[in-house]
Image (cartoon, rainbow, N blue to C red):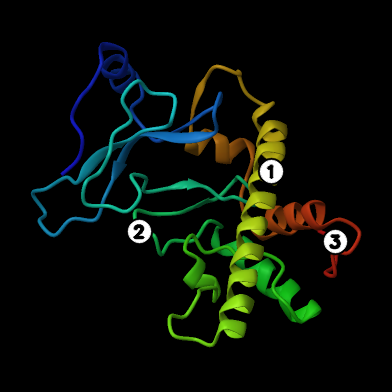
Amino acid sequence: MYQRKVSAADAALRERITELSVHIPCGGLRGPVQLPTRSPSDRGVRWQSCRHENHPVVWGDADVSRERDLCIICLRATAGGRSRWSWLACQDCRAVNSAVEAAWGFRPFALGRHSVMNGFGVRAGAPPEVQQRQIERLTDFADGIGRLLKWRKHEYRRLAGHFDPQADVPLRVWQQELPPGPRASRDAFARLIGPEYPLPLP
């Protein structure tokens, strides 16, 4: 089902980390995760890796070998999942995104992992002029993801400053120190968008 090669360093890591944690040097979540199972006797626990491990675990039955990631906007709640059809942002941030869309008349950020989730794609057999417009929209989607990744890097550094720079911080501790929720999501959007943010400030 998934890759089993484990170095001595990775094995020691898995002995030490007993719950899903934020790896402060990279911002990835790593640790044991409970997956939905069909059988009560199957605990369904897998190791979720971050990119700093010697041999990151690959789940052969998943599009993405991660059950949860920090939300790409607020970096407090979690989002993601094993499917390509997962969200990059948490429920609260998606709600703010929709509220800004209602105010502006267009969606500020495409928060689906797959372009099709955001209404972007190139239809085979469409007239050339239609395909060109679709390609342009797909390019805009890629540019938007790039902007979000830059934001994530900046915001993560700010939040991670609360912790030891080499630590693995349990996700529950991260969220105790940096609580997720609607207010945190509105604050993140206000700083991401800047002066044009159309909603009441948190």
Point 32% across, 53% down: residue:
63
* Badge 3 or badge 1: first in the primary sequence: 1
Q: Position of residue 105 (x, y in %)?
A: 76, 82
Q: CA distance from mark 2 to mark 3?
A: 34 Å
Q: Where does the C terminus fall, quadrant-wise?
A: bottom right
Neighbour tally class for label 3: few under 14, some 14-19, many 20 plus, Cα within 10 Å: few
Q: Which residue is mark 2?
A: 83
Which amino acid type is marked by label 2?
Answer: Ser
Query: Is 141 positioned to the left or the right of 155 in the image?
Result: left
Name the secondary structure under disc 2: loop
Q: Which label sits in the foreground, 3 or 1?
A: 1
Left or right, 58 with respect to 200, comes to left
Q: Are marks 2 and 1 in contact (CB under 8 Å)?
A: no
User: For residue 11, what is the image quadrant?
Assistant: top left
Q: Residue at x 66, y 64 (%)?
A: 140
> Mark 1 belongs to which amino acid?
Lys
Mark closer to the chain start, 2 or 1: 2
Q: Label 2: how many residues lie within 10 Å, few (<14), some (14-19) or many (20+)?
A: some
Query: Under tag 1, what secondary structure?
Result: helix
Return the residue at label 1.
150
Specify few, some or many for label 1: CA neighbours under 10 Å numbering under 14, 14-19, or 20 or more: few
